[in-house]
Amino acid sequence: MANSPQATKRIRRNDRRAAINKSRVSRIRTFIRKVEEALATGDQSAAATALQNAQPEIMRGVSKGVLHKKTASRKVSRLAGRVKALA
């Protein structure tokens, strides 16, 4: 249990931030899943559109601190390679 008012406040703040970060990561996963589904159907134009929508969302996760920069770059790069391979 927190022993000081500051520690209590910190716990409340951490809970709020965790909820926000969880929703951000979930949103990023949803965008990535849409690209994966478009790739599974074999529709290159839909996959390219989904990737264009997912890329800024993934990079926004980097700027908000929920993803590491290199992790995001790797994910975008691998998805882009798979979309390009459909052509």
Image (spheres, grey):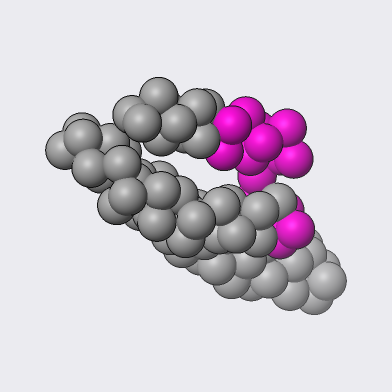
Report if residue 65 lies within the magenta region: yes
Position of residue 33 in the picture relative to residue 43 (left or right) = right
> In the picture, which quadrant includes the N terminus?
bottom right
Residue at 55%, 67% (x, y): give it. Answer: 20
Please state the horizontal and vertical placement of residue 79, each as a whole percent of the image.
47, 34
Judged left or right of residue 42, residue 30 is right
Could you tell me which quadrant the C terminus lies in?
top left
Q: Residue at x 50, y 27 (%)?
A: 81
Q: Does residue 42 appear in this view?
A: yes
With 50 as the anchor, is 17 left or right in this view?
A: right
Front residue (pair 24, 60): 60
Q: From the top left corner, tell me how far across and down residue 53 is, in percent.
A: 47, 60
Against 85, residue 15 (above or below) is below
Q: Is residue 38 above or below residue 80?
A: below
Q: Is residue 83 magenta?
A: no
The magenta stretch spans which residues?
63-77
In the image, is 20 to the left or to the right of 39? Answer: right
Question: In this view of the protein, which residue sits in the foreground, 24 or 6?
Answer: 24
